[in-house]
Structures are given as structure tokens and as C-alpha cells.
Amino acid sequence: MSTPGARVVGLDVARSLAIVGMIAVNVGPRGEPGLLGWVYDLPLGRASLLFMLLAGVGMSIMTRSSRAPGGGPLPWRTVLWRAALLLVGGLALQLLGHEASVILPLYGVLFVACLPLLKAPGWTLIATAVTSLVLGPLLWLWFWAARGGAFVADEPTLLDPPVEILTGILFTGAYPAVVWAAPFLLGMLLGRADLRRPTLHRRLVLWGAAAAIGAYVLSQALIALFGGPGREPGLIHLVAATAHSQMPLWLLSSTGVAAVVLGLCLLGERFAARCLGALAATGRLSLTVYVGHLLVLALLVRPGPFTLAGGILTTSAICAFFILFSWLWARRFRTGPLESLLRLPGRRGDPATGRGVASGNAAPDRAGGT
């Protein structure tokens, strides 16, 4: 029987799977022919959505005590501190030659944007998520149509003017906030639930699978009827369910996949706690591993890899190194190297003991529910 308030290991494992998938996508190459190339491309547009869903879960868990009856105020100073670090750090990382799109600036913006919703009722989160799902892609299409050009991702960096940075995060980057707010808000809603409830786990798997398959099938049917989208902006893009198309059917399908993975990880909580300690440690050090793999790509890997075999070998080596590093680090410390920076200054404490630390991790995954 699980201890009330104990860490939800299934969340850590799900986060580690998201990181592994994002490493594979960022290492590349993508679009290689054959069954193996198809399998290697499976995380594309799915791993990052799982990462975003889990970010929303972590945000609600971190602020859970403030929503309890008689709870204290929201830890808005901590949220703003983390948002600033992720925004500035992510924009700085985008300057490196890793050839990947950094997702951290989006985290920073969403952390700030979600502050008014942290104590809002569940129906408000649902309504806002649905609004992002429906209107977000339309706003994104309108922006590109107004620009009068084909879709070309333009990632903002720390050296860009503030207006270009905001535009890049909202619209032109690989993770436009107007669209990606939907899975983050869904994660916030899930983070309010009892994450140890088997009924919730089964619903995540079943409803997630229905959304993943149903949205993809609907997309293929609409494409057969009306034709597929081209490179120029237009409403015909609404039928697309391809990775990073930023369209509603893709969001539904890939978020459904993320829900299935999360549900399975939560269903296997006991197995994960016994046998997947190294993966769970990787999930607890997700920020360190994410930043670390970008540095490895920039300093050791690029240019390349140029072949599927090289990509698989490089991905395997990077993942093996960081999983081993995370496991060894977690045996000595409670908080990851970069995760400790997310503590509000003056409240970091000792990373080995956790004393003086406001929360046990960047997003302390504890059991419970409201």
C-alpha cells in the first residue's frame, strides 16, 4: 500500500520517457525510409507534448497546498523565479549550435500565464484548454497568412529584440504558445486529481487511445474528401494531423498518445518503483538531462549524424550516459544540479539532505488529490 504523500514514481518514469523521445528527435536524422525509420520517428511531435502535459501536472502539484481548505497563498515568487530562469536560459541555449528547438522559453511564458488559473475551478481550466485547442490553431494560421509566406519555424534567441522574442514564443517557434497551452492546461487539470487512483489510470489509457486513433482517422478521412494541405497558410490545414502541424486533430491525437503513456506509467507504479529506479531518477533530473543533451549535441555531435544507424547509436549513447548519471546522482542527492537553481534564492538548502528546500524537486510529484 502506498504511503500518502509519497512520490509518484510513475510520473518520473513518464517524464524520463518524454526526455528520451525528445533526445531521439533532436539527434536525428528524421524522415528516413523503412520500418526502422518509422519507429525512430515515432516520438516526433509526441514526446514534447508528453513533456508539456507533465509540466502542467507538475505545476498543479507544486501549488496544491494553496488550493486546500485553509491553504496558504500561491507561491507566485517561486513561479516567477522559475519562469524567468527557464525563459532566459532557454533563449540563451537557442544560441548554441545543437540544431534543435528549445522548449524551455515556452515553459517560462506559460508559467507566468497560468498564475491567474492556479486557484481557478476545474471548469475554467477545461474551458481555457478547449479555447486554446480551437482558437489557437486559427490564430496561428491567421498570423502566418498575415505574414504572407510559407511556414518556416523561427526560433527566438536571447539576442533578439523583446518583440521578436514574444512573437517567436507565441507564434513562429516550433512550440507556439497559442497552441501548446492546451496540453499544459490539461496537465494542470490532471495534476489536481488523485494520481494513485486506478480508475484515473484506466481512463487515461482508454480515452487517450480513443483520442489518438479517432483524431488521426478523422484527419485521414477529411484529407481523402477535401485533399491535403500545401505549404501556404489556409483553412485546409485544419484537416492535418501530422507532427508539429499545430492543428487541432494533431493536438488531440498526440495528446491522446501522451495520456496513454502517462496512464500506463501510473498503472505500472509498483513495477516502476521496484525495477525502474534509473529511469525514475532520469525523470527527476529532467531539466539537467534536457539541457545536458543540448550541450552534448552542440559540442560533440554536430554536424551529424547523417545516417539512421548513426542516429540510433548516438541517441543510445546519450541516453545511456544520462540515465547512468541520473541514477548515480540520485543515490547521493535529492535534487538535480540544475533543478536546485529553481529554488527561490535564500531557500535552496542542502541538495544532499533537502533541508531548507521549499519542495523536493523542480516539480515535486506527490500523491494526493482534490
Image (tube, grey):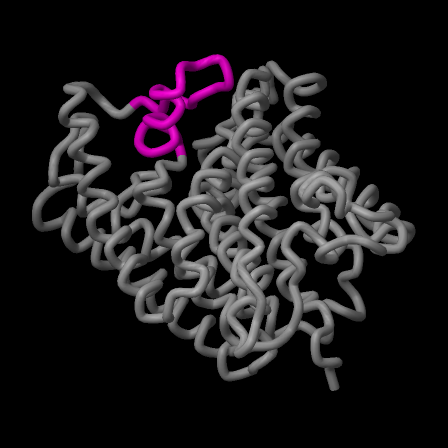
Q: Determine if residue 259 is in view.
A: yes
Q: Which residues are magenta?
A: 152-174
Q: Position of residue 106 (x, y in %)?
A: 45, 38
- Seen in the picture, residue 226 relative to 215 is either above or below; the reply is above
Task: Name the residue furthest bottom.
Answer: 1
Q: Does 17 appear above or below 80?
A: below
Task: Say if the magenta span includes residue 167.
Answer: yes
Q: Quadrant of the N terminus?
A: bottom right
Residue at 40% x, 61% y: name it: 186
Residue 213 is situated, as x and y percent measured from the top left of the image, at: 33, 62
**Left or right of 287: which side holds 224?**
left
State which quadrant residue 151 falls in: top left
Whole-percent x and y of residue 358?
72, 55
Side of 157 relative to 264 (left or right): left
Q: 29 or 13: which is nearer to us? A: 13
Frontmost residue, 75 versus 233: 75
Q: How many callouts does the rendering have?
A: 0
Q: Residue at x 55, y 66 (%)?
A: 66
Q: Quadrant of residue 297?
A: top right
Name the spot of residue 140 as percent of width and height, x first: 23, 36
Residue 248 colored in magenta in the image: no
Q: Is residue 78 left or right of residue 48?
A: right
Is residue 320 visible from the viewing direction of this image?
Answer: no
Image height of 346 relative to 72, above or below: above
